[in-house]
Amino acid sequence: MRENGMERIESRTLYAKIQQKREKMHEIADDFGLDSVKTLTISQELDELINNYLRTKIQGVKF
């Protein structure tokens, strides 16, 4: 099933947020290390964005 217009916009917006969060996570990791609380917090936020993105992608898929 194809995405409707709103799902496409939401999907693109989430993808852009994922890219931004990923870049921020790399910057934080470079500054504070991979095991810092700041890096782990950003990583969890990134995970949440990715999960939301995937949910928008599978909403229209019939199993």
Image: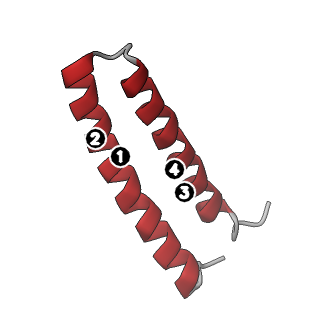
Q: Amino acid at mark 2?
A: Lys
Give the number of the disc on residue 49.
4
Q: Are marks 3 and 4 in contact (CB under 8 Å)?
A: yes
SS under mark 1? helix
Q: Few, some or many C-alpha atoms within 10 Å of disc 4 (few <14, some 14-19, many ≥20)?
A: some
Q: Of the residues under marks 2 and 4, which one precedes in the sequence?
A: 2
Mark number, residue 21:
1
Q: Residue at x 32, y 35 (%)?
A: 25
| Quarter of the rendering occupied by the C terminus | bottom right
Q: Amino acid at mark 3?
A: Tyr
Q: Closer to the observer: label 2 or label 3? A: 2
Q: Nearer the viewer, mark 3 or mark 4?
A: 4
Q: Which residue is mark 3?
A: 53
Residue 61: percent from left, percent from top = 70, 66
Give the distance between the C-alpha atoms of the residues marked 3 and 1, in whole angstroms.
13 Å
Q: Residues within 10 Å of mark 2 (few under 14, many from 20)?
A: some
Given contact means CB atoms under 8 Å apart, are the residues at marks 4 and 1 in contact? yes
Q: Position of residue 47 (x, y in %)?
A: 52, 39
Secondary structure beneath dot 4 equals helix
Residue 11 drawn at (x, y percent)? 49, 68
Q: Position of residue 24 (x, y in %)?
A: 28, 41
Q: What residue did someone put label 2 on? A: 24
Q: Tell me if residue 30 comes above or below residue 51 in the rendering.
A: above
Q: CA distance from mark 3 to mark 4?
A: 6 Å
